[in-house]
Amino acid sequence: MVELGGIGPAPFCGMMLGDLGADVIRVARVEEAGAPAPDAVLHRNARSVAVDLKHPDGVAALLRVVDGADAVIEGFRPGVAERLGLGPDVCLARRPALVYGRMTGWGQTGPAAHTPGHDINYVGLAGVLDAIRPAGAVDWAPVPPANLVGDFGGGGMLLAVGLLAALLHARTTGQGQVVDAAMVDGSALLLAMAYGAWRPGVWQAVGGIDIVSGGAPFYRSYRCADGGHVVVGALEPRFYAELLAVLGLAGDPDFAAQYDRWAWPAMHARLAEIFAGRARDEWARLFDGTQACVTPVLGMDEAPDHPHLAARGTYRTRDDGTVEPAPAPRFAATPAGPVRAPRPLGADTAAVLAAAGLAEDDVARLAKAGVVAVEVPPSK
């Protein structure tokens, strides 16, 4: 797979597929050669070439690499790849079975296709921010869930799924195609279950009091005595009963009707008072091994050391001390191999071009002209 430019979601797609065994070749600018890969975790497992895509000889050299690829990942704004001479029409004409994945915010078509934007714009327009408004909020300001929904869940992961489906089709039929993955589309797709429960004029009227948005006292976070938090997810009656038992509330008439929404404010106030009486880790120990669905809210520095995550190897630590999420999902017959650290930008230019059929003299000529970078100085 050849990965052309882009930050965030496109490299994330490449990282996921590289984790699962794809040979990803990331294209960097010539002037970047030798520098450490930015967003280094997103470039693990990938090889790196440095090519001047504004020079026709650089484009010609890269097209030789594309000729041997199964897929291209492209994260430019609509029309940029075409202006460079690397658009899908050119690439598919050379390799009809190629899958050409395009990662943008607004998509390749539509009135906003050429408008700049970021994650917060896509999740706002798609309805995500309104769907996760705090329960009962009056003076409410949307707070984005970092850039996890638009950039990564609704962006890079969406593109990875699309590429895999298109690759299956290409291997069956020999026909490639363009995959148009838009973050605004993916963000909307993640609202599928919410739209299944939504009714015009009802969702907004209850102000986010929907069960999974924090309106239910048995599905929300609570502040603890030490300033930490726990989350309660006791949706099902048997888990709710276990929650009450651990907290000494079994048989309390105020908690008898779990789904009585009129009782929720009082239930929430009581639970908030109870959870505020102990430190986060005390609650974690108390609920450990129960079926009450109560867990601590861990910081990024704490999560890798949690016994469950450590046992599964959910996070890993590289030799240089960098902590990063491990490849997922897990495969029984074809487990992911060792994760390779990110390569310096342009470190693999000579090897990749040679494998694409360029003669050593041709690579040397391109390097002398500054079209590619093959002699990469050590990283600083």
Image: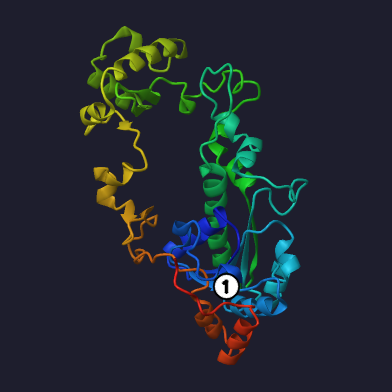
- Label 1 packing within 10 angstroms: few (<14), some (14-19), many (20+): many
Dividing the picture into quarters, in which one does residue 259 lie? Answer: top left
Q: Residue at x 42, y 62 (%)?
A: 19
Measured along the vertical axis of the image, is residue 148 above or below residue 135? below
**SS class of the residue under badge 1?**
strand
Q: Dividing the picture into quarters, in which one does residue 187 lie? A: top right
Question: Which quadrant is the C terminus positioned in?
Answer: bottom left
Q: Which quadrant of the structure image shows residue 359?
A: bottom right
Q: Estimate the x, y position of residue 209 in percent, counting from the top left.
A: 51, 21
Q: Nearer the viewer, residue 323 or 137?
A: 323
Residue 37 position, x and y percent, is 49, 63
Q: Is 343 or 164 nearer to us in this picture?
A: 343
Q: What residue is disc 1 on?
A: 50
The residue closer to the viewer here, 367 or 28, is 367
Asked if one can make out residue 96 in the rendered structure from this viewpoint, the answer is yes
Return the residue found at the far front.
380
Work out whether residue 256 can be spotted. no
Residue occupying the point 67% across, 71% down: 53
Q: Which residue appears at 55% of the width and 31% of the height?
A: 143
